Image (cartoon, rainbow, N blue to C red):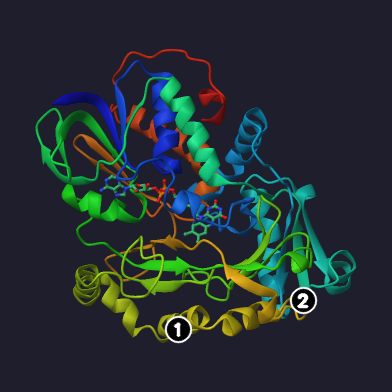
Amino acid sequence: MEKYDIAIIGGGLLGTSISYWISNLYDAKVAVIEKESDVGMHTSSRNTGVVHSPFYLNPNKKGKLARAAFLSHEMWETFAKKKGLPWNMVGTMEIALDEAQHKILEKYMDWGPRNGMSEKNMELLNSSDVAQREPNIRCHSAIHCKTDAVVDYGEFTRKLKEESQRNGTKFLFNRQLESVENLDDATILAFQNKEKISSKIVINCAGGYSLDVAKKFGLANDYSSLHFRGEYWIANAEYTNLVKTNVYSVPKYPDFPFLDPHWIIRSDGKSEVGPNAVPVPSPETYSGYVGDIETFISKLTEIVTGSTRKLLLNADFMNLVAKEWLSSLSKTVMIERIQEFMPKVKPEFFSERGTAGIRTPIITPEGNFLPDVLELVGPNSYHILNYNSPGATGAPAYSAFVVRSMQEKGLLQYKTQKTDSIWDFETII
Ligand SMILES: Cc1cc2nc3c(=O)[nH]c(=O)nc-3n(C[C@H](O)[C@H](O)[C@H](O)COP(=O)(O)OP(=O)(O)OC[C@H]3O[C@@H](n4cnc5c(N)ncnc54)[C@H](O)[C@@H]3O)c2cc1C
C-alpha cells in the first residue's frame, strides 16, 4: 500500500490550489485523489467564469469568501498573463430595477471598500448614465464595477495542476474514495477500484460531495445539502454584442442561492444568459431532473429526515423553487427574466444551451442556508464544505489561508523548502 503524508480528496480548483501551495512549501509526499480522468471536470469548469470583485458580498456574513476574492484577483491576473490564458476585464453592471434595490446598491458601495476594494473601481450610475454606456440595458440605477474579469477556470485548474506536478504532487486519477479507516497516526483510504493508500493527513475538497466525505470521517452529521443546477443559453452570434459588459441584477432573496439569471460575456467572446437554480438530486445531475432512481430516493429520504425539511415550510423558498423549475422547462420563461433589464432580448436570439453547473449549498441543523465556507477539523483530517461562488475567484488566496490554518493547528509538521512560486505565500497571508 502506497503511503503519503498528505492526501487531498478532489481535483477541482480548490484541491489543486491547496496541493500547489503544500508541494511548494514542504518537502512532503502529496497526492490528489480524483475520481475523474483529469482535474477540473466538475464545478471548476462548469461555472460563469467571472473573476468577481467582492462589492456584493456582505463582509459580516461572507467575510472569508469576500477577502479571498479580493486578494485573488491580482493573483489570477498574474497567473493568466504568465501562462498566456485569456484574461478579459469586461466589467460588470450590477443593476437595480427600483428604489428598494437601489438602496442595496448603496450598501454595496460600502461593502466593496470594506472588503478591500478601491472606491475608484466602483461607480454608482443613474439610468441615463447606464443608457449612454449600454443602450440595451434598462434599469433604475447601477454600479459599474470596472475590475470584474472573465476567464476559463477549467484551463486555470489544468495549468495549476502542471505547476503542482512540477513540485512533486502525484495526481491519482480514476480513484473514487469509497471508505475510510481511521488509525491513530494515519487514515486508510479505499477506492472503488479496490486499491488502498494510507495518508497521515487527509484534506477534503470534494466539492458537491464534500459533506458526504466529511460524514465518512464521522463529522457534520447534523448538516445536509441541496443541489441546484444552473443552466445557460448561448446568444446567437449576431446578438453577442447586445451588451458589452456582464449584467447582474440585485438578488431579491440574498439568503437563498437563487440569483436572477445574468447576461454574461465568456472568455471566448460569446455571450450567454444564466444561470438559474433548478433543484436536482445529485452534484452531477447535468441533465434531466431525477437522475438514477437510487440517488433520487436517497436524496428524498435525506430531505424528509434531515435539516432540509424545515426549509420546505418556508413559503418564499418553495415559490422560488417553482419559479426556477419553470425557467428550466421553458426557455421563454428564462428569457422573460432577462427582459426585465434587457427589453430587446427575445427567446429566438438563443438556439443552443450552454454548459450547466451545479451548486451544493449546505443546510445547517436549524434549516438555514450556510452563508460562508465551513471548515471542520478531525484528528488527522481537514474538511472544506460549502465552497460556493465566488469560490473559483478566491481559490488561490483561500487555499493559502487553509494552509496557514493547518500550520497553526500543527497539521503540517514537515520539512519546509523554498521552491520558486508564481505567488508569494507570506505576502498573501
Ligand atoms: C453555475 C455556477 C456558476 C458559478 N460561477 C462562478 C463564477 O462566475 N465565479 C466564481 O468565482 N465562482 C463561480 N462558481 C463557484 C465555483 O465554480 C466553485 O466555488 C468552485 O469551482 C469549487 O471548486 P471545488 O474544487 O471546491 O469543486 P469541484 O470543481 O467540483 O471539484 C471537486 C472535485 O472532487 C471530486 N470528487 C468528489 N467526490 C470524490 C470522491 N469520493 N473521490 C474522488 N474524487 C471526488 C470531483 O470529481 C471534483 O473533480 C459557480 C458555480 C456554479 C455551480
What kind of residue is marked 2?
Answer: Cys
**Which dot marks residue 139?**
2
Q: CA distance from mark 2 to mark 1?
A: 25 Å
For the N terminus, the quadrant is top left
What kind of residue is marked 1?
Answer: Asp
Residue under the point 17% across and 42% down? 193
Q: Is residue 53 left or right of residue 281?
A: right
Dot 1 surroundings within 10 Å: few (below 14), some, or many (20 or more)?
few
The mark nearer the N terminus, 2 or 1, is 2
207 or 74: which is nearer to us? 207
Dot 2 surroundings within 10 Å: few (below 14), some, or many (20 or more)?
many
Mark yes or no: residue 397 visible.
no
217 or 278: which is nearer to us? 278
Q: Is residue 133 above or below residue 120?
A: below
Callout 1 secondary element: helix
Q: Residue 418 placed where, x, y %?
A: 46, 13
For label 1, the residue is 316
Q: Residue 254 placed where, x, y %?
A: 53, 69
